[in-house]
Image (tube, rainbow, N blue to C red):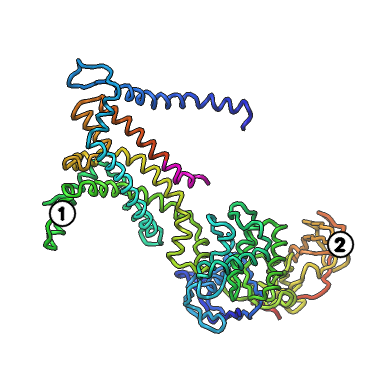
Amino acid sequence: MSTQSTRLAARFMVAPSVILLFIWMIVPLAMTAWFSFRLYRLLSPDRTGWVGVNNYVWFFNSPDFWLALTNTLLLVGGVLLITVVLGILIALLLDQPIKGQGVLRILVIAPFFVMPPVAASIWENLFMHPQNGLFSAIARGFGAQPILFLESYPMPSVIGIVAWEWLPFATLIFVTALQSLSSEQLEAAEMDGASAFNRFRFIILPHLTRAITVVILIQTIFLLGIFGEIFTTTQGGPGSASTTLPYMIFKQAIVAKDIGRAAAGGIIAVILANIVAYFLMRGIGRHLDA
Amino acid sequence: MGKIQLRQVRKSFGDVHVIPGLDLDIEDGEFVVFVGPSGCGKSTLLRLIAGLEDTTSGVIEIDGKDATHLPPAKRGLAMVFQSYALYPHMTVRKNIAFPLKMAGMDQAEQDKRVERAAKVLNLSSYLDRRPGQLSGGQRQRVAIGRAIVREPAAFLFDEPLSNLDAALRVGMRQEISELHQSLKTTMVYVTHDQVEAMTMADKIVVLNAGNIEQVGSPLTLYHNPKNIFVAGFIGSPKMNLIEGAEAAKHNAHTIGIRPEHITVGDGPWEGVVGLSEHLGSDSFIKVDVPGLGIINVRGAGELNVHHGDRIRLAPAGKIHRFDDKGLAL
């Protein structure tokens, strides 16, 4: 199957889709890069022209930018930490032989099917709301002051909401990984005198490394672009306390109607994503090899 | 020390009684083989001894101490699994050292024991490889190495050779036998292959549907099977079991004749040769004798008979007699 002619034919056959995908990617990217060096404000369409790196300079000088960058990384890191740790623990529980396992698994996976703005609304109004929320009712039940989640702890609240949405995904991957662990390995470890914790530490956790890597890589891609949850709940506030890079770009593009600056922000976000991807692949990418 | 005693051990999974109550003594230093057809409960019995399954009732004693409710690690037994159950992310060295590490042994002693085990098992040059880079036979040896470093009271083998090809199986069989000779540790070995049982065992335990059919040395079982099941299970090709008028001549419900105890040439039985296998050293033929059924015959050397030949057979040698309940008379 790998003679010269078949390889040539294969390249020829996949070429159309590769070219299409390349155009799909490069045209928006090139346009964004183009706009990012131009003065392009929707409110003053008559003023246009090249402005060099002014749009970028504005971003780097904006006090919100560094906060947004930190918040973006906090969001990614926080959600990854919560989903991986809790995901493994829940997966260990779900892997036990229990009655109603099938139904239970569907229930655990359910939050993943709730779309982000809906999930955020549910959390905002049913759980975190200072008057109507479940948490405030519990707090009042103990005679305490209700916590103003979105006002006092905006970033942790957003991280919590996003983690709730992504926990099922992580759990699902870990459960399937656990099912592929041979029970004889665990029994052998048990015979070898390994305690439950040591079996987890030396057998189960190494077995899960590849699954953990997959979860981290996939989630990072999606978490870097989280927008809906912030838009629905805190609107990036109070002040700019929960503004992330995507939200800041949104504010430039839709609120300030400055396409040039938003495009510059977009390019910065692309560069950030590539830096994160580089370090991720260097750090944990080797676990993907068989 | 490695004396294992089972007293009225029973095991049920729900309504299924896998082992309906069983007594067995395994002496120190013995090589005991559990043999029986698939689903006879031999692996379950081994797992009960190992502690990987809970007994439904009954007592398991190891070296005179009640071990029925001890966790596997506290029983001082080591097990070699059918799939070898090596830890794929650890090197051979770490695999073998794992039980020592879990026991909290210091590093120098660990290294010493691993080196010694590796030397015995010819693994010294593979210590830094991972299980995935080893052949089936080497993996098998690593699994055994992991078992011997602990210096257990007894070894438990769960069909350890069934994943190997035929040639390797014969080699590993000899290696395990030699290991037993040099270590003199109790070994309990589960197999469905009666050849393995016959060649390796000091004592064979024939199991059928969770019951012990007979316990004895390989040759005792071969020459004096207690019942039809053992007679049919031990020995290859299978013993010929004949019922009806021919058996009645010997005052029995069923008679059994080993294939090598039938001669070809002159005799009372006449039949047509079906399958004939010529191995050079032996010839195995199946003869369809009207009224008796298919008769297995084993002749030493070359028998000049082929498919479709009409030949005469005569019983020559021991005839085993069984009553209508299948017990030997």
Q: Which mark is residue A147?
A: 1
The vertical placement of A199 against A70, above or below, is: below
Where does residue A61 sit, x and y in percent of width and height?
24, 33
**Magenta stretch secondary structure, dominant:** helix
Residue displayed at 48% across by 54% down: A180
Q: Amino acid at mark 2?
A: Gly
* Front residue (pair B304, A263): A263
In three-dimensional space, the C-alpha distance between marks 1 and 2, rounded to whole angstroms, equals: 94 Å
Determine which quarter of the picture holds residue B39.
bottom right
Where does residue B162 sit, x and y in percent of width and height?
64, 60
Q: Which residue is mark 2?
A: B301
* Front residue (pair B281, A50): A50
Mark 1 surroundings: few (<14), some (14-19) or many (≥20) residues within 10 A: some
Residue displayed at 56% across by 64% down: B97
* 1 and 2 marks in contact (CB < 8 Å): no
Q: Is residue B278 magenta?
A: no
Q: Chain of mark 2?
A: B
Where does residue B233 sit, x and y in percent of width and height?
68, 69
Q: Is residue A126 visible?
A: no
Say left or right for A233 vs A83.
Answer: left
Tell me which segment is drawn in magenta.
Answer: A279-290
Mark 2 surroundings: few (<14), some (14-19) or many (≥20) residues within 10 A: few
Residue displayed at 20% across by 43% down: A241
* Front residue (pair B192, A138): A138
Determine which quarter of the picture holds residue A101.
bottom left
Say left or right for B223 vs A81.
Answer: right
Q: Which mark is residue A290?
A: none
- Badge 1 and badge 2 in a common chain: no
